Amino acid sequence: MVKIPTYDDLKKVGMSDQGAQGFSGGQIGVASDTGTQSFGRGIQNMATNLKNIEVDRQKKAGELWVGESNEKLYREFNEWEKQFHIDDDSVDGKGSITKYLDKFQELSDKYLKDSPNQYATQAWKKTMNRFKLEVFKSGAEYEAARSLLHQTESLNDIKDGKILRMAENPAAWGVIQDSYTELLKKLGDNPETKGIEGYNNIWSSTKIKQELEDGLAYIAKTSLDAILEEGDANKIKLVNRMFEKGNFKKQLDAAEYLGYKTKFEQWEKGVSKLEIAKFDTKVKDSVAVAIETGTPKHDIKEEDFIATYGKKNGPALFYKYTEDLETVKQSWAAATHITSGNMSKTDIREYVKNLPRDSERNIAISDHVQKVEANMEKQMEENPIGFIQKHNKQLFEKLGSEDPTTVQAAIEEFMIFQKNYGVKDIDILGQNHRETLVRTFMADGANAESIGLIVSGMRTKYGDHFDMVMANLIKKADLDNQVAASFMYYNEPEFNEIFTVAKSTLDTKGMDTVVGDIRKDIFAAFEPVYEALVGGNKRNVEMVDGWRSLLEKAVLLRMKANPTGNVSDTVKAVMNTYIDSKYFVMKEFVVPKQETSYDGESIEMVAEKYIADIKNADLVVLLSGNEMRDKVFNNTSGGESFLSKMQKENLAVNTRWRNKADGTGLELVWHFDAGNYPVYEKVPLDDYDTEGSAEQQIEITWAEFEAIIPKLKDEIEAKKNKNIQKHPAWRPYDKKVFIN
């Protein structure tokens, strides 16, 4: 047991049963004497300790106040700085540093007044000294930037003035060069301000050199253009003599120099200025269109250049033109790496980043691919169809093919393209096509017969992707989901009536008492249909929700026409017209009665037997996506992998059938909480190539059911005569084995 101390609260340590241990009587005496002698010193230490405690408290309070006040000052100064930039109407930012420092001091003094103690004051001054340096830096950078902007604008005005002077008197070119060079030298950085933050390297020697080159090139080209535009013969002759002496060579690159030289020579020889201008425009347009589309706008030959620019300069200019087109060609070839659909967004960025920029051509190629990437970033989210129309024309053309097989293969390719790039909301139609279809479907005078033919064509064209197409129309183009649901009856005699119901506007005023009952009854009656279609394919939600709403509207319309009718009877009548008379509703799928001569139960039994029969087929293993786990469990070095065996053993409980999107039958899918994935089997490439294999989705068409059921007639009838739910071969729906 724990010994309870027998002393009061002055004694905090519990005593043992035998009392204190380890001290002799003499030791106790010494200890007592020592305590008595040091008592006075203890009292003095107590006062010192109290003082130290108070000092420590004040210092910590001061630090907290400084920290909090500093943040407040920072935010307040930051807001002032933003507003100052807006309100500043100075020409060149002069005096900004002083304004920055004055505002800082004002705020610092304001907060200092609230200092709680001397330690806070001392800490505040140290902090503000550091802050003041940052304020000075910011003020200097802003003032320098405004000053540079003003200087640059002034330089632009000066260059425009020199252009006018040159256009009036080309002979002044030498004086113009000298004066502009001298002006820029004077702009060089002052040694006294060179070390100031913000003012360093405003006009470095490198920058001055670049501005001199660019400025003189601009003055030269703009002046020469103006002289050509004016067409003064004397000035043009003078400029020709200047070209002969080598003027403008330093200011223009080789191609520009040759181009201007040729223009002036041809003008003097009598070639029409207008003709040259037209041909120049044609050449530029041809290259510009090639950059945008990959193909030149015009077929321009060397003789065209010679006819315009003469035998001396024409071939060289044609060579320059062909070189430009070759650069464009290589640019588009480089861009195909990122537009092919085989690269992820990360891989694309890495590819673009590593493109060489070691030559003029490579820089142009790199710039082009970067532009394509930027466009891709935007359009793959907003308009992927528009992107491939421009950058992957082959895929775009396949999507627009008249051959359904080609279209469906192209859709698969296009979907992979978007998934590789990380697009979440997959698009396969494009906004223009969607809007056209919706306008057609929702038009006031839309004819049910014509609409039925369109839908029939779409089912054929899009095949298994029809459901996705309809979902795209509903979500991206606001197609009414009831109208979409009515398309399920496109080849039924009642389609006209059902389509009319879907498009009708219903006023439920005065029907409040029955609306709730109708929705409840329809929900209950329609639930098996919902489970059968949505359980295996979440993409069906929009369509199936619209189908249920369509039934509700049909009941409401009938009740509106006959207010004394019975709700339950009306619901049953509508369900019979829309569902029971047309479909077998099974656990996992629905069977259109017009597609079969047999009952749904027979089809379901054949489908279940099919699963049992393919247990030992060479199925494509469904991997988990976890690289390490799949590597271990799908290791085939010792024969069939563990994962493959597990999937086969649990095939019946981990798969389910669902309706194909094109309406032609059923397809088998792996069915897990995470989603549904089509089941594939490996089959020979063809009858003559048994070595290779291809992946084929497991599916059964209604036509195939028609051929299979008679062969299994006896077996089916035997099962029907028994309690099917207890039959050993009956599929165990109530449990699932997860192997992924």
Image: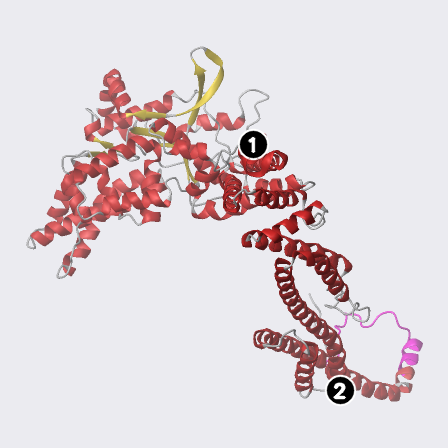
User: Where is residue 45 shown, x and y percent of the image?
Assistant: 84, 85
User: Where is residue 441 shown, x and y percent of the image?
Assistant: 24, 44
Foreground tag (1 vs 2): 1
User: Where is residue 479 shown, x and y percent of the image?
Assistant: 28, 47
User: Where is residue 15 shown, x and y percent of the image?
Assistant: 76, 72
Q: How many neighbours does mark 1 have within 10 angstroms: few (below 14), some (14-19), or many (20 or more)?
A: some
The tag on residue 302 is 1
The tag on residue 118 is 2
Q: Is residue 325 left or right of residue 169?
A: left
Residue 43 vs residue 546, the one in the foreground: 546
Tell me where residue 200 sits by quadrant.
Answer: bottom right
Range shown magenta? 7-32
The tag on residue 193 is none
Tell me where residue 75 sits by quadrant.
Answer: bottom right
**Amino acid type of the residue tagged 2 in the rendering:** Gln
Residue 137 vs residue 357, the one in the foreground: 357
